[in-house]
Amino acid sequence: MRPLVWFRRDLRVRDNAALSEACRIADDGVVAVFVVSPGEWADHDDAPVKVDFWLRNLRALGPELAKLNIPLRIVECASAGEIPGAIAALADDCSCDALYYNHEYEVDERRRDERTVERLARDGGNSHGFHDHVVFDPDEIRTKTGGFYSVFSPFKRTFIAIAEERGVECAGLPPKQIQIEIESSSIPRAVDGFESSIDPSLWPAGERAAHTRLERFIEDRIEAYKDERDFPAIEATSVLSPYLNSGVISARRCLSAAREANGGRFDAKSGGSKGPGHWISEVIWREFYQHVLVGYPRVSMGRAFRPETDRIRWNDDREMLDRWKEGRTGVPLVDAAMRQLASTGWMHNRLRMVSAMYLTKDLFVDWREGERHFMRNLIDGDLGSNNGGWQWSASTGTDAAPYFRIFNPVRQSKRFDPQGEFIRRWVPELADVEGDSIHDPSEIPSLLRSGLEYPDPMVDHRKARDRVMEAFDAIKQA
Ligand SMILES: Cc1cc2nc3c(=O)[nH]c(=O)nc-3n(C[C@H](O)[C@H](O)[C@H](O)COP(=O)(O)OP(=O)(O)OC[C@H]3O[C@@H](n4cnc5c(N)ncnc54)[C@H](O)[C@@H]3O)c2cc1C
């Protein structure tokens, strides 16, 4: 048996379900493949910084696979439609008789995989999919009546009950394979259309880098996580999302490390301490949004989770949207957040909520515009979590913020960046503004403000709030 292991968002050798099982059953070597698929990536708004991160992680993965005697082949396909044929041709060329892969849960990816499995079956090959991107099969966690959860808290309770019962096991390195006469491909340095301008040293590639990040977080920051996680000027969160979403580290590894730090428990309430318990909860949010992708496929297709909210007539104001994208809204915390995204490919969670609420509530622009902009710029862009976060903020999603809960961005700024430290870091034109005016420079007398070169706010928060309430009230009544 010689399996072909198809790497996608699981760019690691340790604790990789498909790779471990392929290596266990193989007796005539293992071949690995990664598909460079620019058409599919463009269709899915994958960001250049994310594609660059994939390529750099593949360059780290190649030598790790070589140590196991597994050659890594790169196949190029202009579009997703070409993938089934290309995988079948490679399996044939390399005399592989089975395909091993870890599931992806988005609708297009599932259809692509189904077509690939069918294509191989026609040639007599069999395929084996594994649940690895998440801890448990998202289809398996169900409500008492057998449905999918649409609210996080009960999902989390069930998830923790299953985790306590079964445990969360991590696999180590797979066994070394016999040497076979197949050469590895060279890995492209860049892919046309996905040239990243973001400093790659911000995001070191490879499993070692991911594990070091996890270890340091657990040692230095997890205890204070609950208290400090909302303050963007403090490095209080793990910043593991790029590694989790590209599969450079497994969610199982993260959960089991946090569980150890939590006195062997998954839940803060059952004896664990608050920091680790809270972090575990965040990792479960990621699981929840993959569950939503499976249970409610409409969210993968640009539709609102709450169908009635698709009747909202959003404000189609291109200039406002552009100013939001460029970080020139006149609301310093929002601008700082948008500039952090543009410069680093990442944004702090509190700021994702603040900037998403600002776009959808203050500017009343369609959440899909913001979702797309985030996907096109985030190194950790993930349909499930991104769509979930956007629909939560727009009050159109699962477990949505009630529509009358509208963040006041200036109050958020005062609360979560009290000294304006984060704002000053990213909006240098405000570096010399003193006191509370850093949160709302429009309150500085106009004579003094004229030298600032900083725009006035685009909307009045109170009026914007009334407009949102009216729009949501109208669909509620209808
Ligand atoms: C509008 C919006 C868009 C978002 N888009 C994405 C996205 O494309 N990709 C993405 O991974 N996360 C997204 N998030 C969730 C969250 O902001 C990031 O996961 C988090 O900021 C990553 O930083 P961290 O690794 O330091 O997280 P930590 O606080 O250290 O949390 C650990 C891990 O838990 C998961 N996690 C934490 N918070 C959430 C959450 N609210 N939802 C889902 N998973 C979570 C992530 O995998 C994260 O790496 C979005 C949130 C919002 C509000």
Image: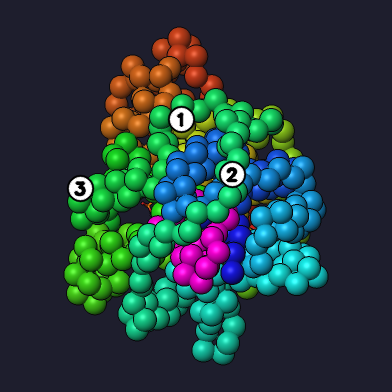
Residue for point 45% across, 14% down = 452
User: What kind of colouring is applied to the model shown?
Assistant: rainbow
Residue position for label 2: 183
Q: Earlier in the sequence, mark 2 or mark 1?
A: 2
Can you tell which mark lies on residue 15? none
In which quadrant will I find the C terminus?
A: bottom right
Give the residue number, with chain letter if any, for mark 1.
200
- Looking at the rendered structure, the kind of residue marked 1 is Pro
Between the C-alphas of marks 3 and 2, the distance is 43 Å
In depth, the one of 363 and 53 nearer the eye is: 53
Q: Earlier in the sequence, mark 3 or mark 2?
A: 2
Up-down relation of residue 343 to residue 160 (above or below): above
The answer, for residue 172, to whether it is visible in the render is: yes
Q: Residue at x 46, y 26 (%)?
A: 199
Q: Report the span colored magenta.
A: 11-32
- Tag 2: amino acid: Glu
Pick whichever, 292 or 213, lies toward us.
Answer: 213
Q: Position of residue 182 (x, y in %)?
A: 60, 48
Q: Are marks 3 and 2 in contact (CB under 8 Å)?
A: no
Tell me if residue 144 is in the magenta stretch.
no
Mark in the foreground, 1 or 3: 1
Q: Quick one: SS at disc 3?
A: helix
Q: Earlier in the sequence, mark 1 or mark 3?
A: 1
Mark 3: amino acid = Asp
The reply to whether discs 2 and 1 touch (Cβ–Cβ < 8 Å) is: no
Dot 2: few (<14), some (14–19), or many (≥20) neighbours within 10 Å? few
Locate residue 409 relative to residue 122 in the image: left or right. Answer: left
Q: Nearer the viewer, mark 2 or mark 1?
A: 2
